[in-house]
Amino acid sequence: MEPRENDEIVRLTEALEAAPEDYELYMRRGRLYRERGLFPEALNDFIRASELRPEDGEAAAHAAMIREILEYRYNDIYNP
């Protein structure tokens, strides 16, 4: 991960510490994690975002996609 990309994740993490109910921050950080191949971290953020806005299907759709990736990549060790 490039320093700039890591800095953005650090900034988002700090922002979430100050605003732990911010759906958009979880979505942004989840997307960054996904882009970096950090799928478990991305899944956690998308799940939390979907808990914050259950009526918004975007976070749930991202979580489902990550679950599919993990299931395919780690079939022997990932059990939903």
Image: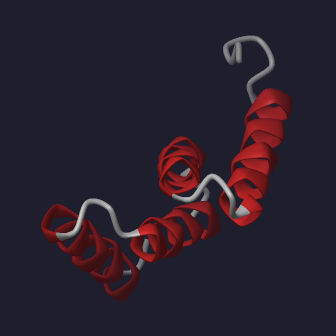
Locate residue 69 relative to residue 11 in the image: left or right: right
Residue placed most toward the observer, 74 or 54: 54
Measured from the top left, where is residue 76 in percent x and y? Answer: 76, 11
40 w.r.t. 60: above or below: above
- Residue sitting farthest toward the bottom: 4
Residue placed most toward the observer, 47 or 39: 47
Q: Quadrant of the N terminus?
A: bottom left
33 w.r.t. 51: above or below: below
- Residue sitting farthest toward the front: 55
Measured from the top left, where is residue 46 in percent x and y? Answer: 57, 54
Locate residue 26 relative to residue 55 in the image: left or right: left
Taking the spot 83% from the left edge, 38% from the top edge, the residue there is 68
Locate residue 53 relative to residue 5 in the image: left or right: right
Taking the spot 22% from the left edge, 69% from the top edge, the residue there is 19
Colour basis: secondary structure
Locate residue 41 relative to residue 71 in the image: left or right: left
The number of numbered badges drawn on the structure is 0
In the rendered image, which quarter is residue 14 located in?
Answer: bottom left
Measured from the top left, where is residue 64 in percent x and y? Answer: 78, 44
Residue placed most toward the observer, 39 or 4: 39
Q: Quadrant of the C terminus?
A: top right
Taking the spot 66% from the left edge, 59% from the top edge, the residue there is 59
